[in-house]
């Protein structure tokens, strides 16, 4: 998945996107790589039996996401879900 590696590395630019309106390509007038507004993100981890064998991979991916993409001004709420939804860590600033 080359696109995922590029996205996680933050290497996407204006030319990596195409906007269509009624099937016609539209020019991207403004493209900013980083917004300054803080984000509030709920990170939900699947804890059902169907992913038990991939549990470590899923948790490592979540840790990587938080460490590499969440900025100081952002906040994250961590939940897991299976038969029920459970909040593990309430919104907290990184």
Image (spheres, rainbow, N blue to C red):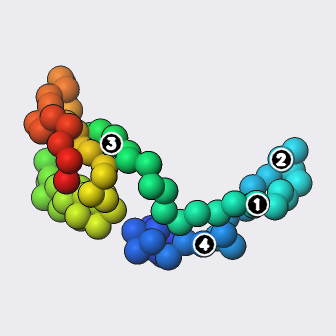
Q: Residue at x 29, y 39 (%)?
A: 42
Does label 3 or label 1 sit earlier along the sequence?
1
Distance (Cα) linking label 4 and label 2 = 20 Å
Check contact, mark 1 vs mark 2: CB within 8 A.
no
The residue singled out by tag 4 in the image is 13
| Of residues 18 and 41, the one drawn nearer to the viewer in this rendering | 41
* Secondary structure category for the residue under label 1: loop
Q: Is residue 39 above or below residue 62?
A: above
Q: Which residue is mark 3?
A: 41
Q: Position of residue 56 (x, y in %)?
A: 13, 58
Front label number (4 vs 2): 4
Mark sitting on residue 21:
2
| Spatial CA span between label 4 and label 1 | 13 Å
Does residue 68 appear to the left or right of 48 in the view shown? right
Residue 18 at what x, y percent from top left?
73, 61
Q: Earlier in the sequence, mark 4 or mark 1?
A: 4
Frontmost residue, 75 versus 50: 75
Q: Check disc 2 and report its element: helix, strand or loop.
A: strand
User: Element type at marker 3?
Assistant: strand
The answer to whether the residues at label 4 and label 3 have Cβ atoms under 8 Å apart is: no
Using the image, tell me which numbered label, if any, was put on residue 29: 1
Which of the two discs, 4 and 1, sits closer to the camera?
Answer: 1
Whole-percent x, y for residue 94 in the image = 19, 53
Picture layout, residue 12 above or below residue 82: below
Question: Reading the chain from its start, which is encountered first: label 3 or label 2?
Answer: 2
């Amino acid at each position: 998945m080359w696109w995922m590696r590029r996205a996680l590395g933050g290497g996407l630019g204006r030319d990596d996107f195409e906007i269509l309106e009624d099937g016609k390509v539209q020019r991207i007038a403004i493209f900013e790589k980083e917004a300054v507004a803080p984000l509030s993100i709920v990170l939900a981890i699947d804890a059902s039996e169907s992913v038990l064998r991939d549990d470590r991979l899923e948790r490592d991916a979540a840790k990587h996401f938080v460490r590499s993409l969440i900025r100081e001004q952002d906040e994250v709420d961590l939940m897991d879900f299976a038969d029920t939804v459970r909040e593990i860590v309430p919104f907290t600033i990184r």
